[in-house]
Amino acid sequence: MVNEMENIKVDQEISETEQAGLFYKMLARRPLIDVIPEEGEGAFWEKNFNNSNELTLYSWRNDWVNNTKENIKHFGYFDREHSVKVFANELINKPVVLLGAGPSLEKNIKYLKNAKEMGVTIMASHHTLMYLADQDIKPDFVCCLDAGKQWTSYWGDGKIDCKNIPLLTEQNSNHEQLKAYPGPVYFYRSTLPDKSVVGKFVEMELKRLVDWGKQGSQIEVGGHILGAMLSLARGVMMADTLIFAGCDYCFTPQGKFYPWDYQIDKTVMMENTDGTVEEKPAPPPAEGMIYDIFGNSVPTNGAYLGFKNVMDAGIKLNAINALQQNNSLEFINASEGGALGALKGGNSKWIKYLRLEDALIYAKAKRDLKK
């Protein structure tokens, strides 16, 4: 299967129609199943992700508190008027693309240029901005969750005019990066694991800084930016069609994660909690193998696997709730690869799997029918 997909990329003679046909042919080999983690995958997740929750909370606790202090000092607000709640119901009965920075984005980013004219909102992870700048694509929203300052070309290296693009970000995101953002900034705060001793400590410290009863919005983030984007798009803005692109949760067989050749795809300078600066691989290297939506074995690490499982479960929960309430909520994996919704036995039945070009056409038609 890998060879077939590689041929799509290297064979310049193959038509768009043939590419689409091969994509759906490969998908058809995979049965649709409920989201039940495979035994081996579940054990790998428990070992590598659940334990890392505590480590993450402990490692970043001081940074979160310091960032919150500095952001309060600079912005002067976390209240409702400056929270993501100002966008409540912004996308009722509308579609949105949730754009991650996975390697599959290289396959279909060209179709994003059609999103605006088709009435489809683009909500992009800030990690994608440099690549979007190269493609002359401007998102409608930018989302950020990073507590650490990772690289200097943070906001598209100045190639995108962000003055009118709202930044939706965590209150404890890196204060230096937020101060440098040229556009409007709107805040949310994320929930912390309530059973975690460290989580309770961090929450207590943050409550001392800000009266939580007077804040704007609290959302579930699932530990990563795409989890936050899911909560923002559905829980706050009430979009009814969520299209995931560049949402892989795995590396290419060659070990590549980001779809570009920037420094971030090699190493980043990370500041440790003791103030020292250390060069670290970006992203962390692969630790094991999982399955992609075509049934191929692909490399991933513990964090990405954990995030994938959180998203699989979150999508299922949202889809079931919508079904019970007779809502037309749909989730579409348009990454054209990757592991979102994929298990050894098949793909999640709670997600549609479409090429991005087809997903945009479908979303526009669905929206037009509701007008």
Image: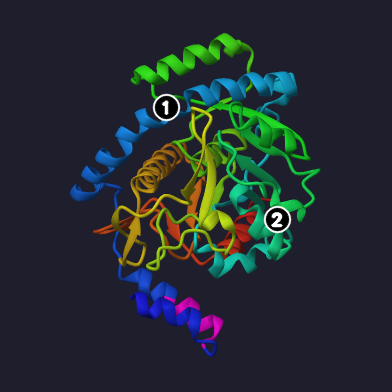
Residue type at numbered disc 2? Gly
Q: Position of residue 342 (x, y in %)?
A: 34, 56
**Residue 92 colored magenta?**
no
Q: Residue furthest bottom?
A: 13
Instruction: Give the label, 2 or 1, closer to the camera.
Output: 1
What residue span does the magenta drawing correspond to?
14-22
Residue occupying image coordinates x 49% and y 27%: 274
In terms of depth relative to the viewer, which is nearer, 38 or 10?
10
For residue 57, the mark is 1
Q: Residue furthest front?
A: 276
In terms of depth relative to the viewer, which is nearer, 201 or 1?
201
Other residues around mark 2 within 10 Å, as few (<14) / some (14–19) / many (≥20): some
Q: CA distance from mark 2 to mark 1?
A: 39 Å
Q: Quadrant of residue 79?
A: top right
Horizontal side, residue 82 vs residue 13: left or right:
right
Identify the colour scheme used: rainbow
Asked if residue 42 is positioned above or below residue 273 in the image, the reply reads below
Asked if one can make out residue 84 in the rendered structure from this viewpoint, the answer is: no
For residue 119, the mark is 2
Q: Quadrant of residue 235?
A: top right
Asked if one can make out residue 309 in the rendered structure from this viewpoint, the answer is: yes
In terms of depth relative to the viewer, which is nearer, 56 or 212?
56
Q: Quadrant of residue 368?
A: bottom right
Residue occupying image coordinates x 77% and y 46%: 162
